[in-house]
Amino acid sequence: MIEFNRAPHVGTEETYIEQAIEGGKLCGDGPFTKKCSAWMKEHFQSGEVLLTTSCTHALEMSAFLCDIHPGDEVIMPSYTFVSTANAFVLQGAKIVFVDIRPDTMNIDETKIEAAVTEKTRAIVPVHYAGVACEMDTILGIAKKYGLKVVEDAAQGVNAWYKGRALGTIGDFGCYSFHETKNYTMGEGGALLFQEESYLERAEILREKGTNRSKFFRGQIDKYTWMDYGSSYLPGELNAAYLYGQLLACDKINKKRLELWYRYYQGLSDLKEAGWIELPTVPEYAVHNAHMFYIKARDLEQRTRLISWLKEHGVMSVFHYIPLHSAPAGRRFGRFCGEDVYTTKESERLLRLPMFYNLREEDVDKVIRTVHEFPDFR
């Protein structure tokens, strides 16, 4: 059976984990946490980078830092993971969902302005599959109405928009280092922001509401409870594993792109014949091969294709159920405008195996198995 996903492993991670153990500091904000943050600041040209226990927690921190209050509204796509919405719902916000673009599966930037009201406080673009949203338009709307922009770049680490790293373009950017992502620490994430004025409050939030970070830098002689907060610090063993992955960033990226284009070329004939649709990457975007998906004709055909692949030793999955159709989505949000593409496109999309240690011969088997699907003959 060809697995759908396996956490990336390049072979150097154990060395850094051993160094962390020998160093004797395994709790948060140790040497490897700092090394990971410094690497990302330099590589992605970001102002500040704070490693977190998950992208979920990075999003929650961004909601705090955006000063979201009960009754505020936050605009985002419905086609996303629950954490994107939960982070703002926890602050009492009402989620306003807008439709997606069928080409990229990203938020339709042309639908956002119609969703803005006097209660709107933030826009949350989600860079699906590591392909950038149309950020210039989104930033223009945010500037016009005085809104914050929080990039959900969970899938967008080492992907780019017009030469800028995803996660560094809005007011806040949120990364994921879950085991399903291009670079992993098992569970983990990062919060990025460009304005230094956010740093002190962000550190207090991350350190259980205390000014402990200042204490460890020797800026104060004792630390105390300053504000609300939680424990958003990952442990050093996780950070050590991630550091090994970040140092191999180019190697991982190169391999994933090779697999992505192998899929694309191998399935292009089915696209040309009109049997399936393949991913679209706009000219303004440089993607990171986070996933490879195809689109079947409809939900029924996708269901048959998933079963066919499984019967022939290939694991494939569909992705998000649109949030606005879920019980919590109906309770905490509303859809603005018409759902032209969100539900329809989500029911067609099927993700194929994609991970760093996937072999080329396995990709070739997946391609052959898709070609042999009876509907495509």
Image (tube, rainbow, N blue to C red):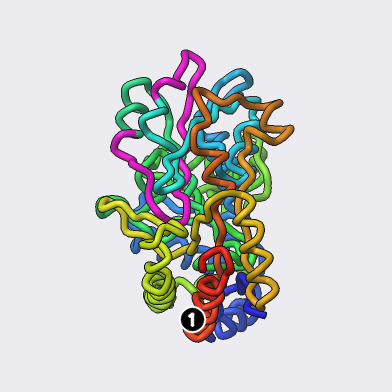
> Image point 49% across, 60% down: which residue?
294
Q: Position of residue 69 (x, y in %)?
A: 60, 23
In the image, farthest residue toward the top: 118
Q: Quick check: 3 left or right of 336?
A: right
> Image point 61% across, 48% down: which residue?
320
> Image point 57% across, 39% down: which residue?
343
Residue 247 in view in this figure: no
Q: Which sits in the foreground, 270 or 75?
A: 270
In the image, farthest residue toward the right: 327
Place residue 40 in its image quadrant: bottom left
Task: Give amino acid for label 1.
Answer: Asp
Indicate yes or no whether the magenta region holds residue 56: no
> Image point 56% across, 21% down: which residue?
72
Q: Which residues are magenta?
A: 113-137
Q: Position of residue 242 (x, y in %)?
A: 54, 70
Q: In this rendering, is residue 163 above or below 308?
A: above
Q: Which sits in the foreground, 194 or 212?
A: 194
Question: Which residue in the protein does label 1 denote?
Answer: 364
Q: How many marks do you count on the picture?
A: 1
Q: Position of residue 87 (x, y in %)?
A: 62, 38
Q: Quick check: 343 left or right of 268?
A: right
